[in-house]
Image: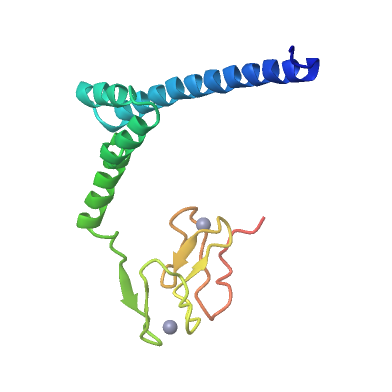
Amino acid sequence: MTPPPAALLDSAAGTFLAIVVVLFLLFFWIALAFWAYRDARRRSDSVWLAVFALAVNVLPYVGLLLYVVLRPPRTMDEERALLLEEQALTEGPAEVISRPCPTCGREIELDFVICPYCRTQFARRCRACQRWLRLGWRVCPYCAEEVAAPGRGGTGQAASS
Ligand SMILES: [Zn+2]
Ligand SMILES: [Zn+2]
């Protein structure tokens, strides 16, 4: 008794599907082994880790799992970044130089030109070059613009053009 044509077609399709699945698994296996090898190279200079990464993949999929469990936890790049981070930590944070505000006494940074708490001004801008000048200065050291004495209006010497 010959099978009906539909069943024959089904079995052919089934065979084809099985071949595709097997090929896919095979390809995936090789790709994973390749990935493990590359991963090993990133994690260590040791040839043995690379050999190990390839060797465990003789066992499809299970080997990769084994490799992932046993591999060094960090890549060399991560190791390097961690080392730099530790160095930065032991050196301590960049020192913030602060001083108390002469008016309100709160800590403010040394190069602040105005106290953010009480609005006391420690410096003002040069009219000509817009740089910050200390209040006591009579002349702008950057552009030689005459600075008006604070609170007394202009000295009349400012160059006008
Ligand atoms: Zn203040
Ligand atoms: Zn100036």
In the rendered image, the residue lying farthest to the top is 2
Badge count? 0
Report the side of 157 relative to 35 (left or right): right
Quarter of the image that includes the C terminus: bottom right
Q: How is the image coloured?
A: rainbow
Report the side of 112 relative to 92 (left or right): right
The spot of residue 97 in percent (x, y) is 30, 67
The spot of residue 69 in percent (x, y) is 30, 41
Q: Nearer the viewer, residue 156 or 49?
A: 49
In the rendered image, the residue lying farthest to the right is 5
Report the side of 77 relative to 148 (left or right): left
In the rendered image, the residue lying farthest to the front is 1
Q: Quadrant of ligand 1?
A: bottom left
Q: Is residue 12 above or below residue 145?
A: above
The spot of residue 54 in percent (x, y) is 31, 22
**x 39%, y 26%: residue:** 60
Quarter of the image that includes the N terminus: top right
In the rendered image, the residue lying farthest to the bottom is 104
Q: Nearer the viewer, residue 137 or 48?
A: 48
Q: Nearer the viewer, residue 159 or 118?
A: 118
Q: Is residue 95 above or below residue 65?
A: below
**x 50%, y 24%: residue:** 25
**x 24%, y 27%: residue:** 49
**x 44%, y 72%: residue:** 135
Report the side of 134 relative to 96 (left or right): right
Q: Is residue 143 above or below residue 75?
A: below
The spot of residue 56 in percent (x, y) is 29, 26
